[in-house]
Image (cartoon, grey):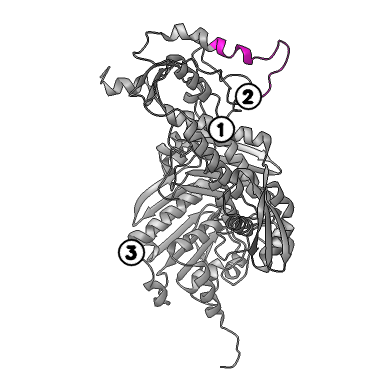
Amino acid sequence: MRIHALSSQLINQIAAGEVVERPASVVKELLENSLDASANRIEIDIEQGGVKLIRIRDDGNGIHKEDLTLALSPHATSKVSSLQDLEQVCSLGFRGEALPSIASVSRLTLTSRQAGDSSGWSLDGSEQHSDPAPAAHPNGTSIEVRDLFYNTPARRKFLKTERTEFSHIDALLKRLALSRFDVGFALRHNQREMFSLPPAPTSVERDARVGQLLGSIFLENSFCIQIEAAGMRLSGWVGRPTFNRSQADMQYFYVNNRMVRDKVVSHAVRMAYQDVLFHGRHPAYLLFMELNPRLVDVNVHPAKYEVRFRESRQVHDYIFRSLQRALAEDGIKSPESEQMPADAESVTAQSPAVAVQSEAAPQGYLTRPLNLGVADQRGTYDAAFQAQRPPQGQRPAQGQMPPQADDSGIPPLGFALAQLQGVYILAQNAVGLVLVDMHAAHERVVYERFKQTFEDRGITTQPLLVPVSVAVSEAEADLAEEAGELLGELGMEVDRLDREKLLVRSIPAMLQGTDPEQLLRDLLADMVEHGTSDRIRQEINAVLAGMACHGSVRANRRLTVDEMNGLLREMEHTERIGQCNHGRPTWVQLSMDQLDKLFLRGQ
């Protein structure tokens, strides 16, 4: 066949194959246009899962009469006009492909009215070269998409059932509603209202929307963060590690209000949770990242789901360190702070305290619960930290002061009452009953001590008796040569022998016995994929975690009351104490209200 130009209809249908995968893809493109038009409320009507009808009406700026025909033309947009605009895109849409692509595979009608116009104007997208006709319409824009894929039956065969297609639309709308609290949304399916969300400008209203869309249990098991550094801002709700999922189905991440799936982001979040999450489980979060639009390229995917960061390593480290610190600081708080409502506009996590190195606990065994009341132990708690207080007139350093007790002087985890079956510590605090898994809690305390000691001393290097030769690709050899300083900081001394061969001369001393070749290959693979690597730290933490597990108190060991209280006090000053090294919870709180309900008191 001779070379020839494609028809505009075929061009649009090819473009539709890239951006219109299913009805939910149409809804996404149209909703993004409404949001870009500064809509305050958007109504979505769906019939038969979007195959029969998709109607979206907004109260945004509207489209000028003279621009309606152009809006259905390929690559026509009001959002970019130069390469400079493309390098700092602030709108959700910008390519100008969506409307003509959708019109090429459906029966589309576009109706719009701008403020000040005497009437609205309507255009039939299936009739080429037609002129807009007057139409009664309020300020804003309505788009009707009927009979999706009616002229491309092969595409229609790939659609799933009505219920499945609508579930994709419902999930998409929830993701958008979680990104724009300033906009109201209403969704109807087959004339039945599914939900109606008013704008949520205040923190209380935002919490209500999150609770409605993600469930109240997510709110109850998450805390709010707001962290700014290096020209970037990270805010939102962070799910506690104990609230984990079998699938990554409750993970929402937005970059400049654009929902994205990005491997740099995913890896950074996963690394932040790695030390506190149960194996094979996934965290839950709703996070918003804001940065200069020039530092993120959104023009890398037709459907705009993916982005590319210009400084990916800086972004990765910022997300990782911010979340890691937030999770570490979300430890044990006073009863009052636990009951305070979360405010999305403030950082709820407070600065952590460093684990207190207590004296060796007195030996002995608890043969029966001692009748030692909370009031009798209060003085012991105050005296326990007297030595930690700085001299008068000297400002205390971060981490020196104990956690804030309540007005009665009772510490957050209270005081030990007894030990249950040699496994659990029963304690009483101002709220009610505290149950502690003593092995899990002590394992975390010891593990954090080991990590802190290791951080203070740094990575020591162990030279190999016989250097190991590793055959690699030329690209990997180049990377190893460029990253020689970074590898040295990680305790790896690597030389380049020739174009495709490296020589490992030393590894971290704590990883003695590890396969040097496999360790280097894993490091290089991480650096190729993510621009950085935490492989060494993971391996070292695994060694430290094993040491902590073997060095912590075992089940069925009887503890004295002083030993139990000593563990409670150290827990209050240990980061990530909510979970053991394997992600299991270390303690739970039962309030008096919860205990009363168990025994039907007051009912």
Instruction: Check contact, mark 1 vs mark 3: CB within 8 A.
Output: no
Report x, y in % for residue 321.
62, 41
Marks 3 and 2, how far apart in space?
Answer: 57 Å
Q: Position of residue 503 (x, y in %)?
A: 68, 60
Q: Nearer the viewer, mark 1 or mark 2?
A: 1
Measure the C-alpha gap from mark 1 to mark 2.
14 Å
Q: Give the range drawn in magenta.
A: 382-398
In the rendered view, would you say 463 is above or below 55? above
Q: Is mark 1 on a helix, strand or loop?
A: helix
| Disc on the earlier residue, 1 or 3 | 3
Position of 358 with respect to 162 (left or right) is right
Q: Which amino acid does label 1 sit on?
A: Glu
- Label count reads 3
Q: Residues within 10 Å of mark 3 (few under 14, many from 20)?
A: few
Mark 3 or mark 2: which comes first in sequence?
A: 3
**Cα distance in 3D space between marks 1 and 3:** 51 Å
Residue found at x 65% / y 52%: 532
Camera-nearest residue between 593 and 367: 367
Residue 577, image x and y in percent? 50, 30
Judging by the rendered image, the residue that carries numbered circle 2 is 399
In depth, the one of 279 and 156 nearer the eye is 279
**Residue toward you, 452 or 139:** 452
Specify few, some or many for label 2: CA neighbours under 10 Å numbering under 14, 14-19, or 20 or more.
Answer: some
Question: In the image, what residue occupies the spot 53% across and 16% down?
Answer: 405
